[in-house]
Image (cartoon, rainbow, N blue to C red):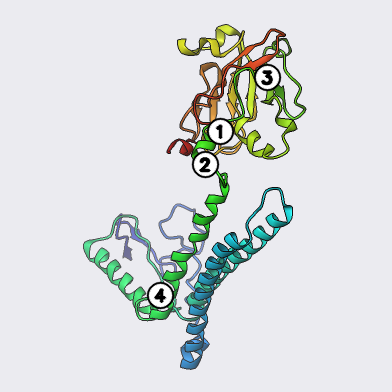
Amino acid sequence: MAKDDNGGKDLIAADSPGAHAEASSGIAVVARDAVANPGLPPHRKRVTDLHPKAERHAERAVYTLFYLSIVGSIWAIAAYMIFPMEGDDVGSVRLNNLFIGLGLALALLALGIGAVHWGKALMSDHEGVDERHPVQGSDETRARAVEIFQEANEESGFGRRTLIRNSLIGALVVFPLPAVVLFRGLGPQNVDPVEALSHTMWKKGMRLTIDPSGTPIKASDVTLGSAFHVIPEGLVDLEHGKLEEKAKAAVLLMRLKPEDLHEQPSRKNWSYDGIVAYSKICTHVGCPVALYEQQTHHLLCPCHQSQFDVSNECAVIFGPAKRPLPQLPITVDSEGYLIAQSDFTEPVGPSFWERS
């Protein structure tokens, strides 16, 4: 007989004389027909355990890989400056992507391969069994856990193998630097990015046109429950910077019943006969908000599932977005075409652009 440490119930060993031959009903604490523990196979030492020369060779290989990772990260930063992207020159874009990509690939692969080789060739590989406990361990057990961490440090050689440790730390420190440098390339190169992203192509009197044809839209064309993907008039004729301007100025145009709109008094004249226009760029990370549900008046961002209520000034009702979609004030001109009253009154896109 054995006692369960937790419940105090009797446990019957599978090979005890009192054990029955029939199969377990499935409710016993220990099944009577449990498979016998086969144990662990004999430990087989690695080449690096048997030959000090092989161990030194493996150690040199690991820190060499970590140094290669540092070289790759530095090369990615250098390539960003040596091979700049110039205007609409496709060749410069290809060279920039190629050499930066090669540097980042070397940095990441060398770091990963070095870490794996370190673990397989140099760290302790003795098999061990970790007993699971249903509740928090005793003070003695927790103190033993601290000792285990100390033993792991000794077995891995992290504190003893200074070349490996220092090269790994160096690779981890240098590896994020290319990303920091490359972030600058996401914004305009010759102007203040905060200022550039705070304004779009929209201005007073500019007509709303259908994307991508550029056809002006009359208020009478917008039926109840419909949604239009809209761009500013003249965008299709731009020769330079068309995608950048579209990325900031894209708008969704929808028509609701006027009584379904819940608008602040200051925004009463921002819509026209139930027609409202909101930025198409999600305020979470800038994905296109392109799915409109006409029965609930909800807009859905398919990237991270943020939802906005069009009837309530596109307030966030679900998801990670933190602020409503910016509204474009609109009206109609003398010919009945929808026009903008002004640019957006707040920055479009992800909320972090506001932190200037």
Q: Find disc 1 in the rendering and name its residue.
A: 282
Q: For the point 70% across and 24% down, which residue is it?
A: 233
C-alpha span from label 4 to label 2: 37 Å
Q: Find disc 4 in the rendering and name its residue.
A: 166
Q: Considering only order in the chain, which callout, 2 or 4, is on the residue closer to the N terminus?
A: 4
Q: Find disc 3 in the rendering and name its residue.
A: 207
C-alpha span from label 4 to label 3: 61 Å
Horizontal and vertical percent for residue 36?
49, 71
Amino acid carrying label 4: it is: Asn
Q: For the point 46% across and 10% down, which residue is it?
A: 265
Q: Nearer the viewer, residue 255 or 50?
A: 255
Amino acid carrying label 3: it is: Arg
Query: Which residue is situated farthest in the front direction here?
Result: 190
Q: Find disc 2 in the rendering and name its residue.
A: 193
- Residue 13 vertical position relative to residue 208 in the rendered view, above or below: below
User: Alpha-carbon neighbours of circle 2 within 10 Å: few (<14), some, or many (≥20)?
Assistant: some
Q: Nearer the viewer, residue 126 or 281?
A: 281
Quadrant position of the C terminus in the picture: top left
Local secondary structure at mark 3: loop
Horizontal and vertical percent for residue 193?
52, 41
Horizontal and vertical percent for residue 150?
31, 73
The image's mark for residue 255 is none
Q: Quadrant of residue 16?
A: bottom left
Q: Considering only order in the chain, which callout, 1 or 3, is on the residue closer to the N terminus?
A: 3
Q: Can residue 229 be seen here?
A: yes
Q: Considering only order in the chain, which callout, 1 or 2, is on the residue closer to the N terminus?
A: 2
Q: Quadrant of residue 206?
A: top right
User: Alpha-carbon neighbours of circle 3 within 10 Å: few (<14), some, or many (≥20)?
Assistant: many
C-alpha span from label 4 to label 1: 43 Å
Q: For the point 75% across and 26% down, which residue is it?
A: 214
Q: Considering only order in the chain, which callout, 2 or 3, is on the residue closer to the N terminus?
A: 2
Q: Can residue 295 be seen here?
A: no
